[in-house]
Amino acid sequence: MCFKKLVVLIVMVPFIFVSSCSIFQKRAASFQPEPDYAPIKKQIEKFIAGRQDAYGIYFQDMGSGKGFGINEDKPMVAASTIKMPLSLYLGTLAAEKKLDWNTRVAYQQFTDYEGGSGVLRYIAREGDRYSLRVLNNLSLTISDNVAFRMLARYAGRDNFVRFMKELGGKTVYPSGRNITTARDMGLYIQAVLDFARRHPEEGKRMLDDLSYSVYHVGLPGLLPESVVVAHKEGDLDEGVVNDAGVVFCSRPYILVVLSSGAENLDEGFRDIARISKMAYDFQEKL
């Protein structure tokens, strides 16, 4: 699917997902039965029961608003999935003309350095200046940790936390820890889609970055290559393996899989891919 088609799809997704009392939802309900997600929930529960990992899962069909959760309110380490709502916050400021993407931020090693993924930890020197646009792109597409820290410093932690709570987040940096829930992350993804409808230019850029990142093994891992998946993966050596995003198949849906306790990160992502394939196959048969 080309990205132009993806944007059109986003714009045309019924607003029944946003407003449960809208006339569109009433019409949809009169023409087709609401999907029953009990079977796929049971299938996924059976799958994860055979794993030692702890899971938090959130699923929502974008057409009907129906879905399910499995430990969806369980606090889990967010890892790099948190980079998605930060990008949304910055995009919102840009759309409101409160932020200029061309603004440059100077690298401060004491506050900004972090190991792990990314390239800036290798090349950034004290005082080097990078535009917010470049930092945001690096944060989403290659999950650059230094870029994220620079963006978070620019945005202000308190402002970012307030924004996530305004979106409906309930578990937002408790005691300063990068903790979230599958449900909260699902709300942030829905907020990205709502943002893309209101601000197509800014929204297209963000969805583009999320759809074509270098880390693409979780939710899209076992899906047809023609299916666009806008998502953000995250992992930590301590056994945290996460992916959260939206799958633009014939019946688009949001899926969040947060996990901890994985002995092998690669296998953890393969399990997320298997869960994603179960959800995809179920949606395609509706």
Image: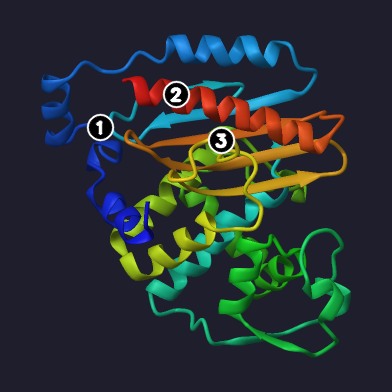
Location of residue 246 in the rendering, given as x and y in whole percent from the top left corner: 46, 42
In the rendered view, does 266 fall on the left or right side of 221? right
Q: Which mark is residue 256?
A: 3
Q: Which mark is residue 281?
A: 2
The amino acid type, in three-letter code, at marker 3 is Val
Task: Give the foreground label among 1 and 2.
Answer: 2
In the rendered view, does 278 fall on the left or right side of 61? right
Mark 1 — residue? 20
Q: Is residue 40 above or below residue 55?
A: above
Q: CA distance from mark 1 to mark 2?
A: 26 Å
Residue closest to the eye, 231 or 21: 231
Is label 2 in a helix, a strand or a loop?
A: helix
- Is residue 204 visible in the rendered image? The answer is yes
The amino acid type, in three-letter code, at marker 1 is Ser
Residue closest to the eye, 207 or 163: 207
Tell me the residue at 38%/59% (across/down): 3
User: Disc 3 or 2, which lies upstream in sequence?
Assistant: 3
Location of residue 285 in the rendering, given as x and y in whole percent from the top left corner: 35, 20
Location of residue 135 in the rendering, given as x and y in whole percent from the top left corner: 64, 74
**How many numbered marks does the figure carry?**
3
Is label 3 in a helix, a strand or a loop?
A: strand
